[in-house]
Amino acid sequence: MSLLATAIDNTTRFIGRLLAWLVLFMVTIQFAVVVARYVFGVGSLYAQESIVYMHAFLFMLASAYTLSEEGHVRVDIFYRSASPRYKAWVDLLGSVFLLIPVSAVIISASWPYVANSWRILESSMEVSGIPGVFLLKTAIPVFGMLMGAQGLVMALRSLAVLFRKPVAELVGAALLVLPLGLLIVWLTVDEGFDAAGRLLGRLSPDAAAAAVSGGEYVARLAADVCLVFFPIAGAVLVVAALAYGVTASSRLPEGATRA
């Protein structure tokens, strides 16, 4: 489980540091839009919408990185001076009963909405806008996934503080990773099967030849690949949790819980 926690942490930090560059791009484009509008009388809806996109991606997708760096606002009157075990219990209970369930609700509620947007490759309502509203909406479930994954990291590391390694890995696999994998499979399997059917149809030579636009064909192909990926990722989490659980249970000594 420690390897899983490290992998998630490294991923969220990479995403956060990469997205931090959007701040510079937002400021630059906003400055250029203002100058172009009020000095040269030229406007660009594409540029204005790009600022909205970058703002959404920055705050939605970098939230997990902020959480990993403990940058979110918190009331820590009692937490700050507490013992490591007290902090571990607070982090564990907060992750299991608040952060992860809310993240699951966000993913569950937004998944059909976003999947439909991908299915039709939803574009801007403006003719000269960005034809990527489906990408903008994708930030909603991805936000839930990243925050849920970071909550999983908090819970696993809290377990490592509270219990010895075999017990922590067994509890983490059985109560955290396994349910998360099953939840992902349950939420995405129907769309995944539909997308797999469409994907097989699109890969046929006749479908590729009949495509009106090569760019649209590739975009729809990529959309179906993404929809197929999520249930597979959930299944991988389930298998990994079962493997970790079996390995950890075989190494459980008597009196494994810490005093």
Image (cartoon, helix red, strand yellow):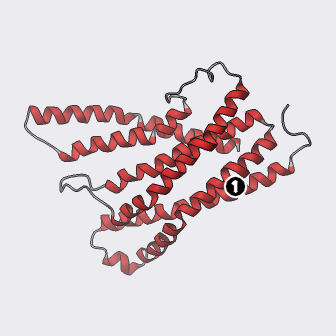
Residue 41 in view: yes
| Residue at x 18%, y 36% (from the top left corner) | 33
Give the number of marks.
Answer: 1
Q: Quadrant of residue 157?
A: top right
Q: Could you say which is closer to the camera, residue 121 or residue 167? A: 167
Question: As drawn, is 29 to the left or to the right of 8?
Answer: left
Question: As drawn, is 41 to the left or to the right of 224?
Answer: left
| Residue at x 79%, y 39% (from the top left corner) | 165
The x, y position of residue 219, in whole percent, is 36, 63
| Residue at x 31%, y 64% (from the top left corner) | 215
Question: As drawn, is 98 to the left or to the right of 34?
Answer: right
Q: Could you say which is closer to the camera, residue 86 or residue 43? A: 86
The x, y position of residue 156, in whole percent, is 68, 40
Query: Disc 1 residue type?
Result: Ala
Specify the farthest residue to the top: 81
Question: Which quadrant is the N terminus positioned in?
Answer: top right
- The image shows residue 39, relative to residue 115, as above or below, that is above
Which residue in the protein does label 1 denote?
A: 240
Question: Which quadrant is the C terminus positioned in?
Answer: top right
Q: Quadrant of residue 166?
A: top right
The x, y position of residue 192, in whole percent, is 51, 67
Crowdedness near tag 1: few (<14), some (14–19) or many (≥20) residues, C-alpha within 10 Å: some
Specify the farthest residue to the bottom: 206
The x, y position of residue 253, in whole percent, is 90, 43
| Residue at x 55%, y 29% (from the top left corner) | 70
Circle 1 SS class: helix
Residue 6 in view: no
